[in-house]
Image: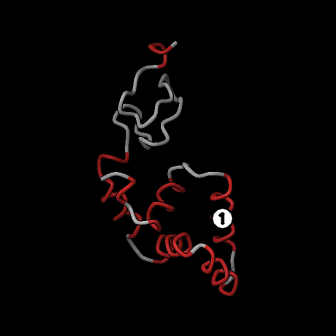
Amino acid sequence: MSIKDLNPAERFIWEWRRGRMSDFRRALVHLIQRADVHNLEKLRLGFPNEVEGYVSYRLIPGWWDDLEAKMGDESVCGSCALDKHSCIDVEGHAKVTGCANHVPKEAVA
């Protein structure tokens, strides 16, 4: 399964947990995390999918585990065990898009 196959609420949480968000969306997560019930409902008016995703993530037991299982092998790079979509330089690995062509850092020097 690809990230493109996720619904908007799942995708929002997947990107947050994998560190693939813009600064604005990261700030939105912080707002949602800190909002009381009244303000959470206000946020839901403008960002229904994002609030739904976060509430599901926090309140539904096993929701995150099910999402990880749904993503299966698409979620982790076999070379560095990082998310395929956010693989970054660690222990000799080069930053690559999607990790499909993961190569040692020295090979791209």
Residue 92 horizontal/vertical position (percent): 49, 22
Residue 4 horizontal/vertical position (percent): 38, 55
- Residue beneath the point at 63% across and 75% down: 46
- Residue beneath the point at 34% across and 51% down: 2
User: Which of the 4 image quarters holds residue 68?
Assistant: bottom left
> Image check: 100 left or right of 97?
left
Residue 28 horizontal/vertical position (percent): 66, 64
User: Coloured how?
Assistant: secondary structure
Residue in the foreground of this view, choosing between 89 and 91: 89
Number of marks drawn: 1
* Residue carrying label 1: 28
Q: Amino acid under label 1?
A: Leu
In the depicted structure, whether residue 92 falls above or below residue 86? above
Q: Secondary structure at mark 1?
A: helix
Residue 17 horizontal/vertical position (percent): 51, 55
Residue with the most extreme bottom position = 38
User: Which of the 4 image quarters holds residue 99?
Assistant: top left
> Image check: 72 left or right of 61?
left
- Residue beneath the point at 63% across and 64% down: 29
User: Which of the 4 image quarters holds residue 81?
Assistant: top left
In the depicted structure, whether residue 86 falls above or below residue 7? above
In the depicted structure, whether residue 53 falls above or below residue 11? below
Label 1 crowding class (10 Å Cα cut-off): few <14, some 14-19, many 20+?
some
